[in-house]
């Protein structure tokens, strides 16, 4: 009897992943998540700490005015959707890891955030992190696979 099932927690091998379709799936999710943030008057980009940990969205930032009841219902529905999507985003984002080196984990999270949330180019990320563009590309691919795997968005060849 095995106490820990490695197969359950393995990250897919990038060679077996259809990166175009996986990237598309993550893009659809991120579009929904970022739109939900906008509907709740949240900043487009989720807040992160200096170590690239997520800060939860603030509740009730949408205002009520003369159309109080209608706006309250709309805000409530939007807030529920944001809460759901933020939980999923947190699951995916927290799955971006390196098993032995916390500095690589932090760099991967930063690359994911800069590339896929902020939309920065590879060369800008490389300059900001003072690493090669190839390393940024590798980190971006591994990060998107880890993120997608946590949300069951990975497509295989």
Image (cartoon, rainbow, N blue to C red):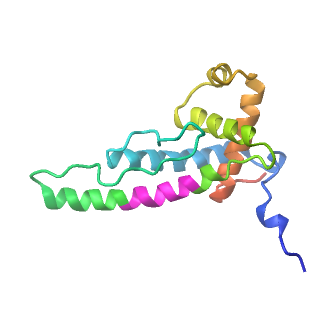
Residue positioned 38% across, 62% down in the render:
80
- Residue 74: % across, % down: 26, 58
Q: Is residue 31 left or right of residue 139?
A: left
Residue positioned 62% across, 58% down in the render:
151
Residue positioned 40% across, 59% down in the render:
81
How many numbered marks are there? 0
Q: Is residue 154 left or right of residue 157?
A: left
Q: Is residue 153 left or right of residue 34?
A: right
Q: Is residue 78 left or right of residue 131?
A: left
Nearest the eye: 99 or 84: 99
Q: Is residue 26 above or below residue 132?
A: below
- Residue 144: % across, % down: 67, 44
Q: Residue furthest left?
A: 66
- Residue 77: % across, % down: 32, 61
Q: Is residue 3 above or below residue 146?
A: below
Quick check: can you spot residue 113? yes
Nearest the eye: 137 or 86: 86
Say which quarter of the image contains residue 88.
bottom right
Residue positioned 73% across, 36% down in the render:
139
Q: Is residue 129 above or below residue 65?
A: above
Q: Quadrant of the N terminus?
A: bottom right
Q: Residue furthest right?
A: 1
Say which quarter of the image contains residue 109.
top right
Q: Is residue 31 above or below residue 74?
A: above
Q: Is residue 86 magenta?
A: yes
Quick check: can you spot residue 21? no
Magenta highlight: main SS: helix
Q: Is residue 62 magenta?
A: no
Residue stretch in magenta: 80-90
């Amino acid at each position: 009897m095995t106490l820990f099932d490695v197969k359950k927690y393995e990250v897919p091998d990038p060679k077996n992943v259809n990166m175009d379709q996986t990237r598309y799936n993550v893009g659809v999710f991120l579009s929904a998540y970022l739109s939900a943030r906008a509907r709740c008057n949240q900043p487009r980009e989720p807040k992160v700490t200096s170590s690239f940990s997520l800060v939860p969205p603030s509740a009730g930032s949408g205002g009520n005015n003369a159309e109080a009841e209608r706006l309250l219902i709309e805000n409530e529905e939007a807030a529920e959707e944001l809460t759901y999507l933020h939980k999923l985003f947190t699951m995916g984002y927290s799955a971006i890891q390196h098993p032995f080196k916390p500095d690589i984990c932090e760099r991967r999270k930063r690359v994911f955030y800069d590339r896929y949330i902020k939309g920065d180019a590879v060369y800008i990320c490389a300059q900001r992190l003072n690493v090669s563009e190839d390393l940024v590309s590798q980190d971006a691919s591994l990060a998107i696979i880890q993120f997608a795997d946590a949300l069951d968005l990975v497509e295989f060849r």
